[in-house]
Each structure stands twice: as structure tokens, then as C-alpha cells.
Image (cartoon, rainbow, N blue to C red):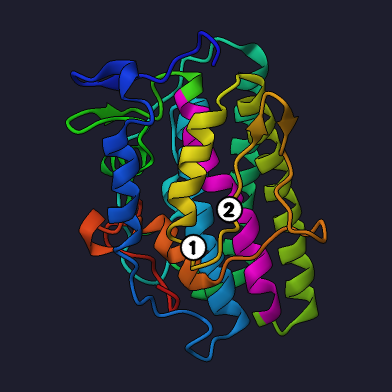
Amino acid sequence: MTNSTIIASGPLGRRGLLSSAGVAAIGAWSGALIPARSAAATAVTDADILNFALNLEYLEAEFYLRAATGQGLAPGEIEGQGNLGAVAGGRKVRFKTPAIRCYAQEIAADEHAHVKFLRAALGSVAVARPKINFDHSFNVAARAAGLIGPGQRFDAFANETNFLLAAFIFEDVGVTAYKGAAPLIADKAVLEAAAGLLAVEAYHAGEIRTLLYGRGLFEAVQAVSDARDSLDGPDDKDQGIGDGKGANIVPTDMNGLAFSCSTSDVLNIVYLGGASSSFGFFPNRLNGLIK
């Protein structure tokens, strides 16, 4: 690991990284899988799928915009059907590396554009931004992965290393969510647009994974991957970034294809297991049919 350290407030300090208590917490996290109302179980429209994507794009846009600019989405970009929620946490990251600052600004602009694109496509049926939490949720996620110990806090916006680890939680989810939803989309024009969104999310994921690899954060990333994998169904498909002997920037199956996550898998990840974690990043759950 480089001299860029994970900042955790509390008595345990850096030695809490990958602690046995933290790794054991993965079991508690994975044991809380929720019976989500998924697209597979309910007849849905293309609009329902796009609204599901919009909820996730709200999350990513708010995360990256706050990290890169200190400001979130504007009032005119968050209203819609369902309950409009506030965003807890998030602030501008004090980037020390100019290139990472530029990457964060570019991703923030892309995610912002995704929100505006989906809202325009959905028109009057677009859902409102649901309530989002970046404080409690990151603590739960980091503790389950063993990045911090009991009583500590993980501040995703404290430095660029924390920012990259937090971004890793989201990016692969975006890719696998769009791929998993593809068979559910009926309109080819909508499918083509979703493919464009998936491609951009894949670029982002590769960017974040490459930066993490360059910092030698192999164990921390693998711990997050293992915790995430405990939530996305019974298969062991989530992957870290490799190690000092070999890179795994592009996570694929044996055929060189990106894997898929169902809507239920994705919900379990962003809800961090469900009620036991106050539904993770979405305390009041998503807006729309798929939630």
C-alpha cells in the first residue's frame, strides 16, 4: 500500500484495516438479504427500468458532484414522482493529485448528464430523487468490509484514497445493473441508450480500478469486493483488482464477458442488506416500481 492511507476516525486506526472483526461482519451483512420487489417478479415497462436506473444515477451524481465540486444536483433536477428526499453527507474532496481531481470532475459531469438524460427521456413519469445517506451507509459498508473497526467512522470524502475506495463500491454495480436489465428492455431505442450508459459506467469503473491498482490497495479492494459479493446472489462473481503479480482491471467471466446483476442483487447491494442497515444508501428505499 502506498503512503496514501485510509482515514478512519476512532480508537483503532489503520491497524483496523481488514481486522477479523470487520471480516466477520461480512457474514452479518450477507445474512440480511432482503426479499426485494424485483423486475423479474413483476411485469415492468421500459419506463420502470429507466426509473430504476435514474435512482442509481441520482446516487452516483450526488456522490461525484459533491466530491468534485462541493455541490449536488440543482432543485430543478430532482423533482418527480414519489417522495423527494434530502442528501445526508458529502463535501468537496481535497485532492492532492491533479489527475485524480480531473478524473473526478469528468465522472461527475458524466453522471450529472446521465441524470438529465434519463429525466428528459422519462418526462412526467420520472421519479424524484429519493433520500440518500452518505454518512451512516459508508460506515456500514466499510465496517462490513473490515476497512474500519467497531466505533470508527469511514469518511468517504476525507482524502482521495477514501474517495477512490468509496467510488469502487458504486462503479461495478452500475455496469452490472445495466447489463442485467438489458433483457428486460423491450424498445430497441431504449436498449441502445442503455448500452451507451453501460459503456460510460464501464469506462468509469475501469478508471477507478486502475487508480486503486496504482496505489497498491489490493487487500482493501478485495475486502470491499467480497462484502459486495455476499449481497449479489449465491454466485462468487464479484472481483477485486488483482495483486502485485497480476492486474484484474477488467472483471470478466471465462468468456471475457462482464457479469450481470439482477435488480434484486443491485437493491441488496445499495441497501447494504436491508432494514438491519437502515437500507444503506437509500434510507427510504428507491422511488418507482422496482424497490
Q: Position of residue 163 (x, y in %)?
A: 48, 28
Residue that numbered label 1 is attached to: 232
Stretch of the chain drawn in magenta: 162-183
Residue closest to the far right: 255
Q: Locate residue 221 relative to residue 27 in the image: left or right.
A: right
Q: Quadrant of the N terminus?
A: top right
The three-letter amino acid code for the residue at tag 2 is Asp
The three-letter amino acid code for the residue at tag 1 is Asp
Is residue 184 placed above or below 135 in the rendered structure? Answer: below
Examine the residues drawn in magenta and state their main secondary structure: helix
Q: Residue at x 38, y 75 (%)?
A: 36
Q: Position of residue 234 (x, y in %)?
A: 49, 68
Q: Nearer the viewer, residue 123 or 189?
A: 189
Which of the marked residues, 1 or 2, is nearer the chain's N terminus? 1
Residue that numbered label 2 is attached to: 238
Q: Is the residue marked by circle 1 packed among few (<14), some (14-19), or many (20+) residues within 10 Å?
A: many
Q: Residue at x 46, y 39 (%)?
A: 223
Q: Is residue 280 visible?
A: no
Q: Is 166 colored magenta in this rendering?
A: yes
Q: Nearer the viewer, residue 289 or 265?
A: 265
Tell me how many marks there are. Answer: 2
Cβ–Cβ under 8 Å for marks 1 and 2: yes
Q: Locate residue 268 relative to residue 256 in the image: left or right.
A: left
